[in-house]
Image (cartoon, coloured by chain):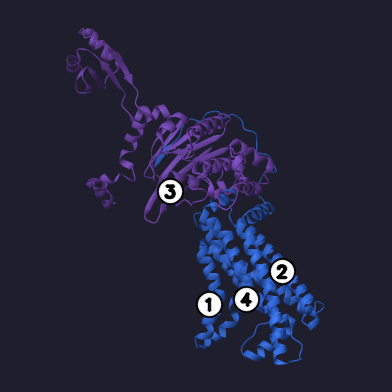
Chain colours: A blue, B purple
Amino acid sequence: MTTATSPATAPATLPEPPAGIHVSFPRLLRSEWIKMWSLRSTTWTLAITAVVIVGFVLLVTWGMLDARDVMGDTDPVNPLEAFGAVPYLGPTAVAVLGALVITGEHTTGMIRASFAAAPRRLPVLWAKATVLAVVVFVVTALAVAVAAVLQSLVFGSEGASVDLGEPQVVRALVGNALYVTGIAVLAFGLGVLMRHSAAAITTTLGVLLVLPILFSLIPWKPLQDLTPYLPNVAGSQITLTDEMIEQQASFTGSVVLSAWEGFGVLVAYLVVVLAAGAWLTRRRDA
Amino acid sequence: MIEATNLTKRYGDKLAVDDISFRVEPGKVTGFLGPNGAGKSTTMRMIVGLDRPTAGHVTVNGRPYAEHRSPLTQVGALLEAKAVHTGRSARNHLRALAATHGIPDARVTEVIEMTGLESVAKRRVGGFSLGMGQRLGIAAALLGDPRTLILDEPVNGLDPEGVLWVRTLVKYLASQGRTVFLSSHLMSEMALTADHLIVIGRGRIVAAGPVDEIVARGTRTSVKVVSPQATELAELLSGPEVTVTSDEPGTLVVHGATAPAVGEKAAATGIVLHELTPVQGSLEEAFLSLTQDTVEYHATMAHADAPSTGQEAAR
């Protein structure tokens, strides 16, 4: 052991730091809010998400009406089905945002400044997750609302207008925002685990896009039985009405989760990923 | 005040910091001097809780860093690698850090002015030069008006004006009673800035104490003598404890004898002296002699050095 000491000199008296200056969770939220909006990637990913949601809902509605006319059908279309594009296309850009919120700090070294300012670390993670979830939820909910209004303005005369007086429809529309938010938080959690932008984004998109295809292609019964419990398959049930879920059950003949069961499964994944991330964050060197 | 006790950090099978204990006192500038890879940055990261010690512990102002309710008012740290998101402007970076503690925006403006970043504060940090990056790091360290400053290689990349500014700043902060802990591998800078030194090599403290004490311990003082009878004088002085060397005719460098002793002997035998000067060793010499055996990355030539490789293998 090597020891180094020196005789203490009488230190000049320093004034105590002002009592109001200290870390608190609301302050960490404010810090994360500043961080989020001071990066260009936030504006870009959110703008892309909003444009994709509004654009595809309108496109799909148009396509549905066109198909009906071509077929010479006179049955009314279900305008809510046009929102089926949201759980497929909405999460891509927010997955990038969710991952970057944390991995961007690791790749640039910013995480050291963040953890030096709040050395307990976990509150930083929770503040990040909260700000991310709220921002993504509000933006997607607004985009869905705008899409619903435009759908009704453009196609309402042809009967393609969602009925906002119907609680099931409202739940499904809000469900779109909930699902997209869930995926953003999933990407964030994977980012916490992996600390690497490309790895976290690729894994999230792999879980969303590749796993369901893989599960359906491999003719092995247990995989088919597990399919309803995949994060996106389960999570996106909340974007459907109970009636649509019943229809789905009659098609597939396999297990179909109800809206809240499905979303609960997605939340369970989030809890597991975030818990693992939190455990590692406390242990790892920054 | 920083107190480290048996602090150890192991990365895989590499021992970066090997059981070191030290104290950094308030009211003076303490230099942390050592070659690259000696463990300076790792030690500093452990102080602010970024790296977990493998063994031992370290406290700042009496508590582990993470237990302070208001860490930024206790410690301001500039760590070696840039700890800044390159996509954010300097001002927003500081605002985000300030927000964690409820530090007002006025203080952000203040540290931007103190560090001379006014003209670039709105630019994205990605385009900053090394010097501007250092200034931003120092600005961040000063945000909380901290009682303790930990600066890892603060003068790296600064222009001479910036170097002088850092030197003046840290001395001023120490004079206010703050603890200043400053690492560098630049001995000349340390000699000018630090009051107290902790010298580290290969993860172990090789010397610690006031700067002049370290210099005295690590170097042998010598006496420069100029004489028309240099050869005669050399023979007279040489002995078991005294060595005499000569780089140019008529000039001697005497080790192991004091200037008065040399003068008296010369006078006794009637030898004429034109110059008699005690030569103080430099911090550079002291540093080299102290860390000679502990340099982690020798120049490539030294890699073939058999004894040192043998030592590695023997561990």
The secondary structure type at the circle numbered 2 is helix
| Camera-nearest label, 3 or 4 | 4
For label 4, count other residues whose C-alpha is less than 10 Å away and answer few (under 14), some (14-19) or many (20+): some
Q: Do the residues at discs 1 and 2 belong to one chain?
A: yes
Q: Do the residues at discs 3 and 4 belong to one chain?
A: no
The CA distance from mark 1 to mark 3 is 45 Å
The amino acid type found where label 1 is placed reads Val
**Quadrant of the image occupied by residue B148:** top right
Query: Which numbered dot is residue B8?
Result: 3
Query: Which numbered dot is residue A210?
Result: 1
Give the vertical position of B252 relative to A282 (above or below).
above
The CA distance from mark 2 to mark 4 is 15 Å
- Label 2 marks a residue whose chain is A
Q: Where is residue A134 in the image (x, y as percent from the top left)?
A: 69, 63
Residue that sits furthest to the right in the current view: A165
- Label 4 marks a residue whose chain is A
| Camera-nearest label, 3 or 2 | 2
The CA distance from mark 1 to mark 2 is 26 Å
Q: Earlier in the sequence, mark 1 or mark 4?
A: 4
Query: Which numbered dot is residue A88?
Result: 4
The structure residue drawn at horizontal position 36% and vertical position 44%, both measured from the top left corner, is B202
Q: Earlier in the sequence, mark 1 or mark 2?
A: 2
Q: Mark 2 points at which residue?
A: A143
Q: Is residue B188 among what the camera can see?
A: yes
The CA distance from mark 1 to mark 4 is 12 Å
Q: Do the residues at discs 3 and 2 belong to one chain?
A: no
Q: Is residue A264 among what the camera can see?
A: no
